[in-house]
Amino acid sequence: MSTRFNVIEHDMVPDHQKMSEGEVAELLSRYQITLEQLPRIYGDDPAVKSIEATTGDVIRIIRKSQTAGLAESYRYVVKRPKK
């Protein structure tokens, strides 16, 4: 019997949160950008899978920062291209 490890619980992995449609609309409006202008993250990323995000979702990543305290970044979930 194997125990699955939840990558989100690891100390080195920053907090990943799936954003609601309203939060995404606010983000895009605040920065006057489109989804396609956000940095991307693949849907098969272990952190993305662990929060059950899917292609088209936007993820908020919150990291601890020595200079800023907490730093937020955003990623648009995309499908990994086939080789």
Image (cartoon, rainbow, N blue to C red):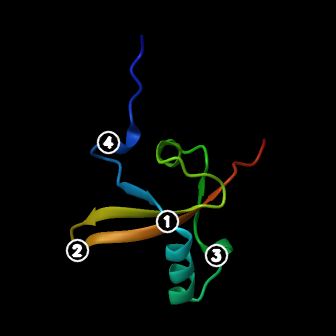
User: Which amino acid type is marked by label 1?
Assistant: Met
Residue position for label 2: 67
Q: Earlier in the sequence, mark 1 or mark 3?
A: 1
| Contact flag, marks 4 and 1 (Cβ < 8 Å) | no
Q: CA distance from mark 2 to mark 4?
A: 24 Å
Camera-near label (1 vs 2) is 1
Instruction: Count how many numbered circles sit on residues in the image.
Output: 4
Residue position for label 3: 37
Q: CA distance from mark 3 to mark 4?
A: 29 Å
Camera-near label (2 vs 4) is 4
Residue position for label 1: 19
Q: CA distance from mark 1 to mark 3?
A: 16 Å
Camera-near label (3 vs 4) is 4
Q: Earlier in the sequence, mark 3 or mark 4?
A: 4
Residue position for label 4: 9
Closer to the camera in the image, 66 or 22: 22
Looking at this rendering, what residue extends furthest in the right direction?
83
Q: Residues within 10 Å of mark 1 (few under 14, many from 20)?
A: some
Q: Kindly identify which numbered label has been placed on residue 7.
A: none
Q: CA distance from mark 1 to mark 2?
A: 25 Å
Where, by quadrant of the figure, is residue 44 drawn? top right
Query: The N terminus appears in which quarter of the rendering?
Result: top left
Q: Earlier in the sequence, mark 3 or mark 2?
A: 3
**Residue located at (41% from left, 56% from top):** 16
Where is residue 38? Give x, y as percent. Answer: 59, 72
User: Which amino acid type is marked by label 3?
Assistant: Gln
Q: Earlier in the sequence, mark 2 or mark 4?
A: 4
